[in-house]
Image (tube, rainbow, N blue to C red):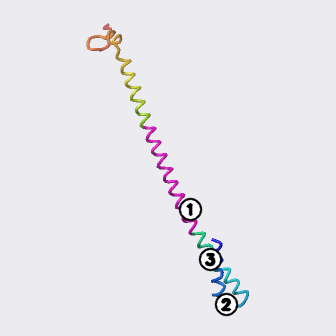
């Protein structure tokens, strides 16, 4: 970048030969500043594009992790429900029930 700036400065010096000394120097500095600002703006745009891409990838990764965790939680819940069903309808409990597995009621 330094050699590029030096080449641009040399080109600018030759383009402002007709102006007075101070004004020529000021114009030369303004053009160098403008070129530098343009270069910085281009670099900033590239950096921001990379940052946006990285942020999007991070968000996508987080969403995928959340979905995986949700799926795992649902599987665990289904296992717990299945285990509760097995424990609830055991043979001793069915024996305590009336016909067809219905609880016995006392009639007054």
The image quadrant where one finds the C terminus is: top left
Front in this rendered view, residue 48 or 92: 48
Earlier residue among tags 1 and 2 = 2
The image position of residue 40, as x and y in percent, is 60, 69
Residue at image coords 48%, 47%: 61
Mark 1 Cα shell of 10 Å, populated few (<14), some (14-19), many (≥20): few
Circle 2 sits on which residue?
A: 17
Please identify the quarter of the rendering in which residue 16 is found.
bottom right
- Can you identify the residue that label 3 sits on? 34
Question: Does residue 64 belong to the magenta stretch?
Answer: yes
| In-front residue for pair 4/48 | 4
Q: Earlier in the sequence, mark 1 or mark 3?
A: 3
Q: Name the residue furthest front.
A: 3
- Residue at position x 57%, y 66% in the image: 43
**Vertical order, 33 against 17 (above or below):** above
Q: Is residue 48 magenta?
A: yes
Q: Which residues are magenta?
A: 42-70
Residue that appears at 46% across and 46% down: 63
- The reply to whether callout 1 and callout 2 are in contact (CB within 8 Å) is no
């Amino acid at each position: 970048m330094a050699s590029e700036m030096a080449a641009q400065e040399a080109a600018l010096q030759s383009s402002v030969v007709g102006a007075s000394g101070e004004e020529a120097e000021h114009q030369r500095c303004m053009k160098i500043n403008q070129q530098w600002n343009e270069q910085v703006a281009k670099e900033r745009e590239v950096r921001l594009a990379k940052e946006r891409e990285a942020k999007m990838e991070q968000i996508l990764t987080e969403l995928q992790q959340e979905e995986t965790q949700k799926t795992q939680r649902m599987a665990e819940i289904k296992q717990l429900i299945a285990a509760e069903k097995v424990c609830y309808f055991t043979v001793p409990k069915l024996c305590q029930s009336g016909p067809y597995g219905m609880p016995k009621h006392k009639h007054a």
